[in-house]
Image: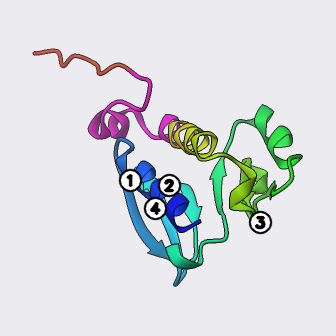
């Protein structure tokens, strides 16, 4: 599980505009524009799962799978919690985290989006000269 968490950390940190830090004493958090898109923890050696944002239509689908549930305190915002790291293959988990990043990125102000650069799957916009 430790290697899966390290891969998840590296992937989240590589997304455009992503920052990482420790919150609440022991939870590893990835954010974009100051807004969380992934919360995992506590520490990599003790990793027991993570939480991330999903689309409304995926929320019921994912929370109906063994090893996943609505995230405590954040389910109303359509966050799911992966309780069992073995419940999803790494490739699926990375894709869900990328989508969580894109969902959070899309809610940022246009100005902040431009400052951070294009989101995953978005073409860079050419800069127009005045």
From the image, state whether disc 3 or disc 1 is nearer to you.
1
Q: Residue at x 39, y 43 (%)?
A: 15
CA–CA distance in space, label 1 to label 2: 9 Å
Q: Residue at x 18, y 19 (%)?
A: 127
Pointers 2 and 4 in contact (C-beta within 8 Å): yes
User: Is residue 107 toward the left or the right of residue 120 in the image?
Assistant: right
Residue 94: x %, y % from top left: 55, 44
- Secondary structure under tag 1 reads helix
| Span colored in magenta | 104-122
CA–CA distance in space, label 4 to label 3: 24 Å
Instruction: In the displayed orientation, state which residue is furthest to the left.
Output: 130
Q: Which numbered disc, 2 or 3, marks the residue that appears first in the sequence?
A: 2
Q: Can you identify the residue that label 2 sits on? A: 8
Q: Can you identify the residue that label 3 sits on? A: 72
Answer whether residue 32 is visible to the viewer in this image: no
Q: Quadrant of residue 42?
A: bottom right
- Secondary structure under tag 2 reads helix
Q: Which numbered disc, 3 or 1, marks the residue that appears first in the sequence?
A: 1
């Amino acid at each position: 599980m430790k290697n899966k968490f390290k891969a998840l950390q590296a992937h989240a940190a590589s997304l455009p505009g992503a920052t990482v830090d420790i919150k609440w004493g022991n939870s590893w958090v990835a954010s974009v524009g100051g807004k969380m898109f992934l919360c995992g923890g506590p520490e990599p050696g003790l990793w027991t799962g993570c939480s991330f944002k999903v689309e409304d239509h995926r929320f019921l689908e994912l929370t109906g799978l063994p090893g996943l549930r609505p995230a405590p305190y954040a389910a109303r915002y359509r966050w799911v919690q992966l309780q069992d790291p073995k419940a999803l293959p790494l490739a699926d988990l990375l894709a869900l985290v990328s989508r969580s990043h894109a969902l959070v990125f899309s809610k940022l102000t246009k100005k902040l989006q431009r400052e951070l650069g294009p989101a995953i799957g978005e073409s860079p916009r050419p800069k127009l000269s005045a």
